[in-house]
Image (cartoon, grey):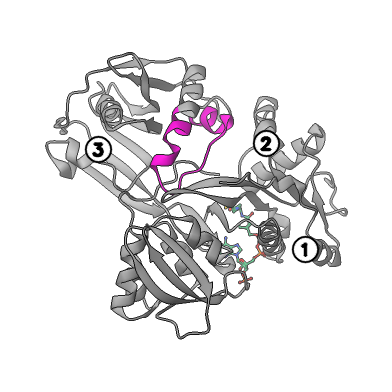
Amino acid sequence: MAELPDARALPLDETTRAALAERGLEYRLIENERAAVMDEWSHAVRRGFAGPELSDAEIAEWREPMSWRRVTGVYDPSSPQAERPIATASSWVAPMTIPGGRLPSWAISTVTVAGTHRRRGVARALLEAELRDAHAAGVPAAGLTASEATIYGRYGFAPATRIAAWNVDCRRARWAGPEAPGRVQYLDREDAALLMGALHERTLAQRIGELPGWPRRWRGRLALAEDRNDAVRAVRYVDEAGEPRGVMAYLIEGDPEGDGGTLSIRYLVAEDDTALGALWRFAIEHDLVATATAPMRPVDEPLPWLLDDPRLAVSSVTDHGWLRILDVPAALEARGYAAPAALTLRVTDPLGYAEGTWRVEIAEGRATVAPTTGDPDVALSVIELSAAYLGGFPLAVLRAAGRVTGSAESVDALDAALRVPRAPFLSIVY
Ligand SMILES: CC(C)(COP(=O)(O)OP(=O)(O)OC[C@H]1O[C@@H](n2cnc3c(N)ncnc32)[C@H](O)[C@@H]1OP(=O)(O)O)[C@@H](O)C(=O)NCCC(=O)NCCS
């Protein structure tokens, strides 16, 4: 993959600046090297997500991840807190794992609008600017994780990866998986944060939909960055040669010495299946624990197959990583395919970026995509294309929901090409 564009290099979007100025608001590109400006911006983000004021230590943790992002804010000069933005957003270009490679994606984060300024089109102005910026930078897709599933479809985003919240009844569960030859060991949380980052980096290519993380992400999972909590603990799995292959942050809550505690896995990353099994086993067999939960794991976690009673591993599934294709030929030509196909694809896009009709020829695992005036075999909007792109949502299902048109044969052929061996998964919130 060519070098990724630096989102910070783009000028402020003029359309959005002018639209907000008409409403007496100032759209600003934040000089994120200026601590005082950034601190006010960070406080605004926290307020936007309904959290308490950030402490000095938390503010300090925020600076690093914002230093490499493009940070924007909207200011209301009439506010008594005029230096604190009434709306925030940040973005950067991240390499997203796709079948057979990585796709530059415009990651959008920290989108908030103050309660005093909600539902006046401020978020729309920001989101449309982000998409124009991404397009101007030549980035073929945008991504985000959504607080609510009803916000982003209007901009062409669709859920593309899912997460499962797993729950195990530890009192009844009996381990039926393989014996791991290595060992599980406690680890200092600072060391665990470093190991988490290293293992995430090493395993990035294994999961379609995954993005690189950054130190505060891991420190947050270990409750070192925000919401500090010394009850969070960390263990690692080392193989027979002593090489760390997995790490897990967890917290035991509830009533361990009474009805039994709940062990919540805050983050687990494993380089191989042995490490994954060993860390799950540690959680499930932990003394004084009645329930083990993991709120953000893959939908195809092998967990039920590791227990003698698979019904004791229960999962509930929700959308997680959202994707918005901006450049259809670039996105389709970037990924690998599981089967050949040849068809004409019609994509509609109210914002125009993905609009068009293309002849898609897939052979030997790669696609060539060229504009055509031919009749489409498959027609869909950018939302369905974005949902199906990583292989997590079959088009046949979207067709059954009346959201894709085309013959069953054409849709099935495209699904066969898009199919991926494991469920797409994004392990972080951003
Ligand atoms: C979500 C949020 C950013 C929306 O900001 P906003 O300025 O009120 O949104 P806008 O006025 O620009 O609304 C644009 C459109 O989105 C819709 N919309 C906005 N927030 C919505 C929500 N939470 N659920 C459903 N629709 C929503 C509006 O109805 C409007 O629809 P329309 O243009 O199709 O008529 C704001 O409510 C917020 O800060 N929420 C808390 C933080 C958060 O959840 N951020 C999202 C992080 S992923």
**Circle 2 sits on which residue?**
53
Which structural element holds mark 1?
helix
Residue for point 46% across, 23% down: 195
Report the front residue among 226 and 384.
384
* Highlighted range, magenta: 199-222
How crowded is the residue under tag 1: few (<14 C-alpha within 10 Å), some, or many (20+)? many
Q: CA distance from mark 3 to mark 1?
A: 48 Å
**Circle 3 sits on which residue?**
168
**Circle 1 sits on which residue?**
16
Identify which amino acid the numbered label 1 is placed on: Thr
Q: Quadrant of the C terminus?
A: top right
Identify which amino acid the numbered label 3 is placed on: Val
Residue 160 picture location, percent across and down: 44, 57
Which structural element holds mark 3?
strand
Q: Is residue 292 above or below residue 71?
A: above
Quadrant of ligand 1: it is: bottom right
Instruction: Say whether residue 112 is magenta.
Output: no
**Residue 191 visible:** yes
Q: Is the residue at mark 1 in contact range of ligand 1, meaning its CB lies under 8 Å from it?
A: no
State which tag comes first along the sequence, 3 or 1: 1
